[in-house]
């Protein structure tokens, strides 16, 4: 395992942690990499949606990276951090034996908003646009993501990154920013999520469908917000252990393999 912390240059205190499978017997094998963005309302980076996710994707045979991005800062600060992290991944693709056609961003709640933001803004937002396209994700895994600043928004998340600026809030309503350049997506949510309404995922899936972008959407009937792996090992309470939802990680791994 190549396990190291790499500081990001955009903002002080931001960094990425690598979980790179290092098998000297597999010299010619290249693996997908999952770039994980924990949730936390853009106010923290939740540890429950960080290393446990990375290790689960390692167990599925993928490399992983966890990004501790800017918090409590206006858009596009966190987006710049994620863009830089994806570029670092591609810069190290040979050493880390990464399949550069399968660099996947994976985010939870506000981290889902961040992952989806790179998906929609990688080639249009001046703060992150690059001529070499190194920051383009090949796919997005969005877990109970914040998407909209509209009727079904999670007001707290949008407030943090917009500073209550109406123009920024409109810009970060991502269902309105999807273009044909957005990568494919695997999205999951629970119907009973009382924190980030399920409509967020539905709006994103519908926007992707309008652009004919391949999307897999799963809506589980029960479960609170912030489930992570939905196992007892990461649950904050008994309600956070939901056996039916635990299947998402395997389904996402299969989706990545089939991209």
Image: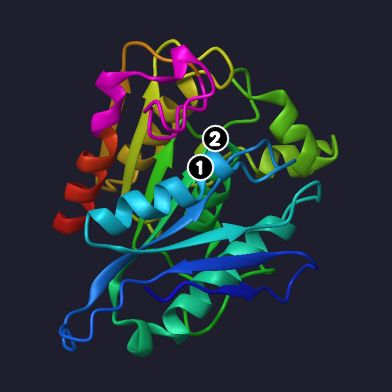
> In the displayed image of the protein, which residue is found farthest to the front?
233
Q: Are marks 2 and 1 in contact (CB under 8 Å)?
A: yes
User: Would residue 217 appear left or right of 38 to someone viewing this image?
Assistant: left
Q: Residue at x 54, y 66 (%)?
A: 17
Disc sitting over residue 49 in the figure: 1
* Closer-to-camera residue (148/26): 26
In magenta, the rendered stretch is: 225-247
User: Disc 2 on helix, strand or loop?
Assistant: loop
Camera sees residue 179: no
Q: Residue at x 43, y 85 (%)?
A: 92
Q: Quadrant of the C terminus?
A: bottom left
User: Would residue 101 appear left or right of 127 to someone viewing this image?
Assistant: left
Q: Residue at x 29, y 29 (%)?
A: 246
From the viewer's perspective, is residue 123 above or below residue 172? below
Disc sitting over residue 109 in the figure: 2
Is 194 inside the magenta-drawn segment? no
Q: Dividing the picture into quarters, in which one does residue 47 lie? A: top right
């Amino acid at each position: 395992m190549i396990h190291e912390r790499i500081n990001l240059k955009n903002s002080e205190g931001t960094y990425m942690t690598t979980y790179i499978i290092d098998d000297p017997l597999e010299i010619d094998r290249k693996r997908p990499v999952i770039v994980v963005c924990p949730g936390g309302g853009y106010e923290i980076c939740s540890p429950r949606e960080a290393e446990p996710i990375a290790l689960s994707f390692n167990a599925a045979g993928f490399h992983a990276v966890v990004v501790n991005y800017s918090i409590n800062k206006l858009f596009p600060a966190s987006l710049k951090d994620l863009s830089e992290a994806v570029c670092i991944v591609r810069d190290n693709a040979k050493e880390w034996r990464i399949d550069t056609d399968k660099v996947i961003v994976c985010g939870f709640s506000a981290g889902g908003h961040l992952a989806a933001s790179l998906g929609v803004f990688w080639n249009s937002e001046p703060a992150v646009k690059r001529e070499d396209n190194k920051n383009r994700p090949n796919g997005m895994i969005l877990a109970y993501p914040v998407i909209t600043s509209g009727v079904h928004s999670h007001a707290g998340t949008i407030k943090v990154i917009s500073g209550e600026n109406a123009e920024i809030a409109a810009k970060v309503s991502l269902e309105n920013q999807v273009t044909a350049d957005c990568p494919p997506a695997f999205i999951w949510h629970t119907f009973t999520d009382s924190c980030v309404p399920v409509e967020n995922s539905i709006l994103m899936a519908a926007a992707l469908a309008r652009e004919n972008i391949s999307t897999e959407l799963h809506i589980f009937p029960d479960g609170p917000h912030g489930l992570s792996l939905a196992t007892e090992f990461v649950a904050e309470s008994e309600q956070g252990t939901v056996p039916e939802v635990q299947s998402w990680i395997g389904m996402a791994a299969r989706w990545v393999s089939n991209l």
